[in-house]
Image (cartoon, rainbow, N blue to C red):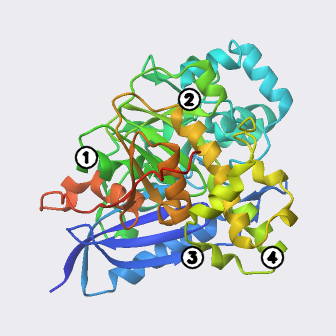
Amino acid sequence: MSIPVIAIFDVGKTNKKLFLFDEHYRIVYEKAAKFIETVDEDGDPCENLDSLELSVFDSLREVFRMAEYEIRAINFSTYGASFVHLGEDGKPVAPLYNYLKEFPKELCEQFYKTYGGEGLWAKETSSPVLGNLNSGMQLYRLKYQKPELFAKIKYSLHLPQYMSYLLTGKPYTDITSIGCHTGLWDFEKNDYHTWVYQEGIAEKLAPIVPSDGVLQGNDAANGKLVGVGLHDSSAALIPYLVNFTEPFVLISTGTWCISLNPFNTSAVTEDDLENDCLCYMQYKGSPVKASRLFAGNEHEIQTKKIASHFDINTSVFKHIEYDADVVQKLKKDESRQPVSLQQSAFASRNLHVFENYTEAYHQLIIDIMEQQLFSTSRILSPNVKRIFVDGGFGKNAVYMNLLAAAFPQLEVFAASMAQATAVGTAIAIHHSWNNKTLPSDIIELKYFSAPHHTII
């Protein structure tokens, strides 16, 4: 007898994964892929959209042929700040521009001069000024730098909604994508910001539908129900909102370490915004105060540097245990430096001062933790008593012990759940495919106590 499942595509910047979850949200099948990036018309690296599309169709054909599974629904979560621009014929008319692409300085000045300055705009949209990471600015750039291309655009869909569109043929917009540092949404008005209407951007954005909505799939989806897709950081929060009612902060770790506080209702200040705080939108439509840190990216860069210096493979860093004595030694004569969110202090350290790679690695995590403490503290609220960490750093003993030391007043847990983002994406449309009640045991917690002798 075949097992009822939901298929979830979880598309990250680096890894693209397909999961099948049973009705208890256990993974019964998974497949991962990596694609070589291509370049846009300016020679800048960008996602290979053709490879991504083919992978979706090929993977679905493969799992539909598996007699042991009955696929009842399909949904998508992907990284944010990425638009696919569709023409009148429903086909992409432009590359999927990389959110790290440099934004033209003169256009930036023109925009903020027109719309009241960076501070006001950032406050109203709850979006730090981030260039192309404000995905609305990508459309603004096309309008003024590539007007012929801009004129061809019928709809610009954020990547999760484009993935859904591939299987439904229906273009829609989802609040978790437009409510995430896009610069498009006015959180006070609960509508698109004035500039979006004045620049003719609103008409290129598809109708907004609920994040937990489902659509009838096309032939490629075998007629199955298809979700409208979710922004990955918002999706990762869903299992926690379902399982825990006491206020908490979730640090969702990957390329970015994003601290999410759904229990902080205070408005984002200009000072917050200057320090990479913002509001996300959770799938039910309420704001989530959040702060971002590019710590996973920093970790990758600096571990390669350590590995090269000590002539080792980067895989050894997955198995380094926390050593309190090493931390004490490193911190004994350490003078506290101002924290930069752009780069850890480790970037400017001389690796020759470290006796071995273990010592160097502990110093790297100490330096990242200085940033993490600064970042997470900005969105903490007095009602929060717990921090949950999911993703890669949750499995990192050095990071978790130092996090517990950084927040001794809070209970700190590594949350062990197979693929929180993908699970959240499945739970979002639970009602449409799953007849069972939501399980209360999908998150395993490992408690980390603050070491008495370690102070961050």
Mark earlier in primary sequence (3, 4): 4
Say which element carries label 4. Answer: helix
User: As shown in the figure, which amino acid type bears the numbered disc 1?
Assistant: Phe
At numbered mark 2, what does the secondary structure look like: helix, strand or loop? loop
Q: Is residue 92 left or right of residue 169?
A: right
What SS does tag 3 mark? helix
Which one is earlier in the sequence, the residue at label 3 or at label 2? 2
User: Marks 3 and 4, Cα distance to the nearest angstrom?
Assistant: 16 Å
Camera-near label (2 vs 1) is 1
As shown in the figure, which amino acid type bears the numbered disc 3?
His
Q: CA distance from mark 2 to mark 4?
A: 46 Å
Residue 213 in percent (x, y) is at 29, 47
Does the rendering let one see residue 202? yes
In the image, which disc is placed on residue 310?
4
Label 3: which residue? 319
Q: Are marks 4 and 1 in contact (CB under 8 Å)?
A: no
For the residue pair 406 and 438, the one nearer the viewer reads as: 406
Disc nearest the viewer among 2 and 4: 4
The image quadrant where one finds the C terminus is top right
Q: Which residue is mark 2?
A: 184
Give the residue at x 81% y 80%: 311
Marks 1, 3: nearer the viewer: 3
Pointer 1 residue: 244
Instruction: Using the rendered view, name the quadrant where residue 421 is placed.
Output: bottom left
Mark 4 or mark 1: whose residue is earlier in sequence: 1
Q: Earlier in the sequence, mark 1 or mark 3?
A: 1
**Mark 3 against mark 2, which lies toward the viewer?**
3
Mark 3 to mark 2 CA distance (whole Å) = 42 Å
Q: Are marks 2 and 4 in contact (CB under 8 Å)?
A: no
The amino acid at mark 4 is Phe
x, y percentage for residue 164? 43, 56
Label 1 – label 3 distance at C-alpha: 31 Å
